[in-house]
Image (spheres, rainbow, N blue to C red):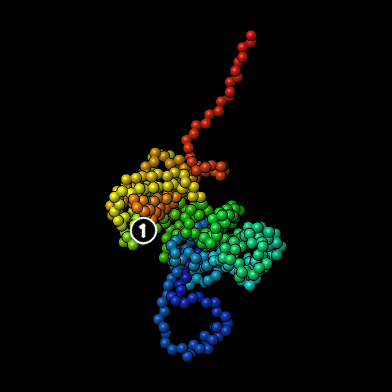
Amino acid sequence: MTDAVIHAEGLGKRYRVGERERYLALRDILTRLATAPFRRGARTRDYLWALRDVSFDIHQGEVVGLIGRNGSGKTTLLKLLSRITRPTSGFAEIRGRVGSLLEVGTGFHPELTGRENIYLSGAVLGMKKTEINARFDEIVAFSEVERFLDTPLKHFSTGMQMRLAFAVAAHLEPEILLVDEVLAVGDIEFQKRCLGKMQEVSQSGRTIVFVSHQMNQIRRLCERVIWVDGGQLQRDGSAKEIVNAYEVASLSVEKAEIERTPGLLAFHSWYIENNRSNRLDLDHVSGPSVIRFQGFAKEGVTRGIMVVILRSHDNTILWSGMYPEIRMEAGDWEFSLSFERLPLHPGIYTWDTRFYDGHRWLDHVQVPELSIVSETDTDIFDYLKGPLNLDVKFDLAAQKEDKVGLP
């Protein structure tokens, strides 16, 4: 093993289709052995490789995003790293105490109270009672379940279980934190607190592997991204590079699929004309930018209105444009926005595009995020900056004293 805290080599997991993985007790094994001579014939078995030949190293202090479509093998990979399930092939070596948050309530006992489950989770992580006591109040405050702390977990709502599970996983200080797509259960404010806590955890030198379908969360938190597709490692590299490639691939939809969508308008791609590389981010937005949106219309429109809105990450409207007298024929279409300059600070922004055909608003066009990323333009005062990155000239000069003449 190298100096990595996670070392995976040729990792693979195979499942039998139609059969759930079971954890067998001793009586189950003895029953199988006793009845084996009486079982005749062999049923045809259909197997599925959920993960196959995956190798990578993750080093201490890295924050790694794990992305991919539903069913690509992300959760299976985290279960293998968490030792919840065994690999069919290959191996994974882990150096350090692992805290995992894979599903709501993972590692909790439904009959135990919230308080008892906190101590149970700490014991599983190998912590002493005094260590858990030292962090107990922080866990309860973060999870906001103090009123129900002595209630059995089975009576908690899904959101309450998730808040408590995340608070325990983040505050009991495992060296490695594995987090699956569980933040989607919480509300927006709790998601923000979770992301803030994970940033705090990463700054303390601990390692995080984070699964999410929200690319803005991946961009905010992760330095490196592993892209899994079809159970195999697709790409591994910087978050900016891999997320851009993943989004481009996600938008490469066959025209036949687009025509089957329920709306009258369907969006399928966009690009920045200056580089024509389908990059979904802008490093520097200092010069003119032409952004072209492409899609498909099922029906023609003779006199419509196009509305385009640019929003910040918290849904605040930063800019909007309304363009009347639009004529659109059925088939492929493209419209463009030409900006002399987009004076935006680094961050995540979204386009909201809607079309009115003179009688009704059509389904609005789903446009991907606009990510403006610049490592060189960020500093410790970022939280004081608003969304606009305006050109301002600052000048400081000593004020001259007025001389008053004597009579």
Q: Nearer the viewer, residue 151 or 94?
A: 151
Quadrant (top left/top right/bottom left/bottom right) for the C terminus: top right
| Front one among 244 and 386 | 386
Q: Residue furthest front?
A: 359
What amino acid type is highlighted by mark number 1? Gly
Q: Is residue 388 above or below residue 277?
A: above
Q: How many marks?
A: 1
Name the residue located 51 percent from the left edge and 57 percent from the top edge.
64
Query: Relative to 50, does residue 190 appear above or below in the rendering?
Result: above
| Left or right position of 52 against 292 | right
Residue found at x 46% / y 44%: 318
Q: Is residue 173 visible?
A: no
Residue at image location 48% in from the left, 72% down from the top: 88
Q: Is residue 84 above or below residue 334?
A: below
Q: Quadrant of residue 46?
A: bottom left
Horizontal and vertical percent for residue 109? 62, 71
At mark 1, the secondary structure is loop
Which one is in front, 203 or 250?
250
Q: Residue furthest bottom?
A: 38
Hey, which residue is sitting farthest right in the picture? 130
Report whether residue 398 is seen. Answer: yes
User: Whole-percent x and y of residue 307?
Assistant: 39, 47
Neighbor class of circle 1 (other Cα within 10 Å; few <14, some 14-19, many 20+) is some
- The image position of residue 228, as x and y in percent, is 44, 62
Q: Looking at the figure, which quarter contains the N terminus?
A: bottom right
Q: Residue at x 68, y 59 (%)?
A: 137
Judging by the rendered image, the residue that carries numbered circle 1 is 263
Q: Position of residue 260 (x, y in %)?
A: 33, 62
